[in-house]
């Protein structure tokens, strides 16, 4: 069962807003066994919409359209849908009453323009929009479904959750789609592929594998499709166990809830230990990752962004002569920063980063892309040197991920 998502709006095409609707809709459709064949963004233009609708219905069983519904003249989706289905618009009294009540509660004037939002094609089943004034529209023709929804994200989600998703599960006999994500760190995509090549080749034909690389990490996503959920669950679990035996040293968790920052949080919570961070080249990115996890205040004490040498000296007690002798981008300074932040905040562990993220080297001896990461533990401090190349964003992200990876290994050692 395949679906296409069509978003309508010039504001998407000119980059004024991000199309978050499609991402959310795709995730929800996938949960009920519907695969997304294509996502398309188009202009607020009648001919463009008509062409996109025709192509989508030729390719898919289900078409979900968002945007272009509202009281203004540039919201043309409803009129275009009526033309597409060789239909006409009629006033739906129930929707008109709903819109009028909403305006009265808000103490707004209810005008003829607002009443026109209750005009819908006769061939559709109107879907009540409890969070807004533009109704959804459900068309069912020749075994295929076309749904039109408001583009406002919270209105779209309300219509999907209350009306569209339940109706789709009743209308079609849907398969099960099961995903399992394995999170790996410290190994590149090509090397990882070589290590698991035999395992990948021997996957059952109903299970597919996708590589999702990012700076410093690779997510492996297993997808199983079929009509028996128990068979899928057991097959996925079996393949994961096989994989864990092949690459036990690089797997840090499963699914998005087990990103490395979350794994570290669990470890520190279990051990009732605490962490502080001193960042130079990463500029607070590590602290951002750590604090993105709910409950991180239980183990993450705080951070100092020591971007300037004076902050390293005054806030972290790094010896000025150490900086003068070795420069700020050095193992010695990284380790002194880690010791300084650990002592300052009295934590069990500390991370420190210093390096050249670029585009300049800031009067150091090291080239752009060179970073030093230091970890201070209850018993010792150590540092590692890395070269992460360019551009600046890549250096910052890879340094952050590698720092967390080093910390995780150190916690597990102890």
Image (spheres, rainbow, N blue to C red):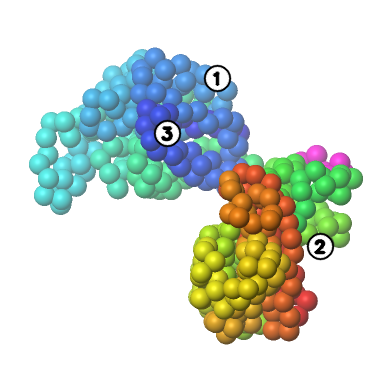
Q: In which quarter of the image is the N terminus?
A: top right
Measure how far apart labels 1 and 3 are at the Cα level: 29 Å
Marker disc for residue 58: 1
Residue located 78% across and 56% down the image: 240
Q: Label 3: few (<14), some or many (≥20) within 10 Å?
A: few
Residue 25 shown left or right of residue 341 in the figure: left
Q: In x, y percent, where is residue 2?
A: 59, 32
Query: Which callout, 1 or 3, points at the residue further toward the start of the chain?
Result: 3
In magenta segment, residue 220: no
Measure how far apart labels 2 and 3 are at the Cα level: 41 Å
- For label 2, the residue is 249
Outermost right residue: 198
Magenta segment? 200-206
- For label 3, the residue is 15
Give the quarter of the image for residue 300.
bottom right
Residue 230 shown left or right of residue 248 in the figure: left
């Amino acid at each position: 069962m395949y679906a296409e998502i069509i978003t309508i709006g010039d504001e998407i095409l000119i980059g004024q807003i991000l199309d978050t609707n499609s991402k959310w809709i795709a995730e929800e459709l996938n949960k009920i066994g519907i695969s997304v064949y294509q996502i398309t963004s188009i202009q607020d233009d009648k001919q463009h919409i008509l062409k996109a609708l025709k192509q989508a219905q030729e390719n898919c069983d289900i078409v979900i359209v968002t945007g272009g519904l509202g009281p203004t003249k540039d919201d043309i989706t409803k009129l275009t849908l009526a033309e597409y289905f060789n239909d006409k618009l009629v006033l739906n009294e129930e929707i008109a009453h709903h819109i009028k009540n909403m305006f009265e509660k808000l103490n707004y004037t209810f005008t003829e323009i607002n009443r026109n939002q209750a005009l819908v094609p006769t061939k559709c089943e109107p879907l009540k929009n409890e969070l807004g004034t533009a109704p959804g529209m459900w068309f069912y023709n020749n075994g295929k479904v076309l749904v039109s929804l408001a583009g406002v994200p919270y209105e779209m989600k309300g219509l999907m959750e209350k009306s569209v998703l339940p109706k789709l599960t009743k209308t079609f006999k849907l398969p099960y789609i099961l995903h399992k994500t394995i999170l790996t760190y410290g190994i590149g995509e090509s090397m990882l592929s070589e290590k698991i090549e035999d395992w990948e080749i021997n996957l059952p034909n109903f299970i597919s594998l996708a590589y999702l690389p990012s700076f410093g990490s690779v997510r492996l996503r297993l997808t199983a499709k079929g009509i028996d959920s128990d068979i899928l669950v057991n097959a996925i679990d079996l393949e994961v166990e096989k994989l864990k035996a092949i690459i036990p040293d690089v797997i840090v968790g499963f699914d998005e809830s087990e990103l490395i920052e979350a794994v570290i949080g669990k470890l520190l919570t279990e051990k009732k230990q605490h962490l502080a961070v001193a960042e130079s080249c990463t500029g607070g990115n590590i602290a951002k990752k750590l604090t993105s996890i709910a409950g991180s205040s239980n183990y993450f004490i705080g951070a100092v962004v020591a971007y300037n040498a004076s902050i390293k000296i005054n806030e972290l007690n790094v010896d000025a002569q150490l900086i003068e002798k070795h420069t700020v981008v050095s193992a010695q300074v990284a380790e002194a920063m880690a010791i300084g932040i650990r002592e300052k905040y009295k934590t069990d562990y500390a991370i420190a980063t210093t390096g050249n993220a670029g585009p300049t080297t800031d009067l150091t001896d090291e080239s752009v892309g060179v970073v030093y990461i230091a970890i201070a533990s209850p018993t010792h401090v150590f540092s590692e040197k890395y070269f992460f190349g360019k551009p600046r964003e890549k250096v910052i992200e890879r340094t952050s991920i590698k720092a967390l990876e080093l910390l995780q290994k150190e916690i597990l050692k102890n």
